[in-house]
Image (cartoon, rainbow, N blue to C red):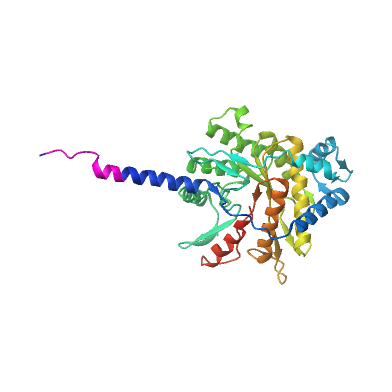
Amino acid sequence: MKARRSGGRNARVAKRQSAAQRTFDHAWRRWENPYRPIEQFSADQIEAVHEASLKVLRETGIKILSPEACGIYAKAGMDVSGEGIVRLDPDHLLDLIANAPGEVTLHGRGDGRDVTIGGRHVGVCTTGGTPNFSDLDRGRRPGTLSSLDDLCRLAQSFDVIHLIGPFVEPQDIPTKLRHLHMTRSVLTLTDKVPFVFFRGTEAVADAYEIIRIAHGMTAERFHNTPVCYSIANSNSPLQLDHLMCRGIIDAAMAGQMMVLTPFTLAGAMAPVTLAGALVLQNAEALAGLALSQIVKPGAPVCYGSFTSNVDMKTGSPAFGTPEYTKAAFASGQLARRYGLPLRSSGVTASNAPDRRPPMKCRWPCGAP
């Protein structure tokens, strides 16, 4: 009996399929937007928002609750009052913002997991920070560490997901230990770019050290290689609290990505008009980004946007609305105005996994 010949047609077919598979995977892992960004507002309207934001920061200022951050602003030449109100000179502010890189590559641990954001590059991230989640089998319930682990496994299986968010809060883990378990889960179950919460210097330092060890980096290399990202939220209107200021400083010193995202809701903590809400968002974003660039010029940062409106009957946040989408497009225009990467969100208020959520989520995708 003759032995079956190895190779041949089946081997050639398998080789062609594997090459096609590698090309397909690479295409999903590295996104570039082939289309022109949507210009929701005219150049004159965007410039008006820009000028009004600078006026707010120059005349009204922003309240900084961190004495350390106030000292940093003061050393940089900003006007700091005894009440912690920081007023920023527009020319000095724009010079600081100009130091920030227009594109940033975040380095993952797996092959082909590096993600570049800024310009035409696009990175897709999971959601994060939710206290509860639901599925078809067991319905809605509080987040646990096991549910976080399952979501990490799920996200790892999709090449179209490039960055890992904090998914759900594992409420079965004590708060003081939660960051350790969450970081371990993300690093052991995925090889993608992880997220770090700004929950105090000790917690941030713990997470950075775990990530550094997972990458096998020296401390010097870690401080010069962005491998994770964090989000700092201003307290609208016009306030940065101690925890967020500390996080901005920590991220800049460590050379890791910081996304400054004001949470401005028109009709609640922001003016009811879209233009007024955008002015507030832009002023808060610029003030926080400037702090990062004072600490370390050239530190990787990202312009974050989350301006929406509230339900005028209940006062609750309204997501997936036309106003939110318009604000996302305008934020993209503002980010390009400053030469910064943009972080936005595809949100929905749908309560069912039907056609509505993906339709609403795709609307803001033209913002970058």
On the image, the x and y values in percent for residue 85 come to 86, 46
Query: Can see residue 189?
Result: yes
Image quadrant of residue 254? Answer: top right
Residue 308 horizontal/vertical position (percent): 69, 61
User: Does the image show residue 270?
Assistant: no
Q: How many marks?
A: 0
Residue at the spot x=34%, y=45% of the render? Answer: 16
Q: Nearer the viewer, residue 266 or 144?
A: 266
> Which residue is painted at 29% across and 43% down in the image?
12
Say whether residue 335 is magenta.
Answer: no
Relative vertical location of residue 47 with respect to residue 70 in this rendering, above or below: below
Question: Which residue is pictured at 65% across the width and 66% down the height?
Answer: 321
Residue drawn at x 58%, y 53% is 127
Where's residue 50, x and y in %? 79, 52
Q: Residue furthest left?
A: 1
Q: Which residues are magenta?
A: 2-13
Q: Is residue 252 left or right of residue 69?
A: left
Relative to residue 42, is residue 24 depicted above or below? above
- Position above or below: 71 against 154: above
Depth check: give the residue in front, 24 or 255.
24
Left or right, 247 with reference to 10: right
Question: Residue 98, position in %: x, y?
Answer: 74, 40
Locate the N terminus by quadrant.
Answer: top left
Name, please, the residue furthest toward the bottom. Answer: 313
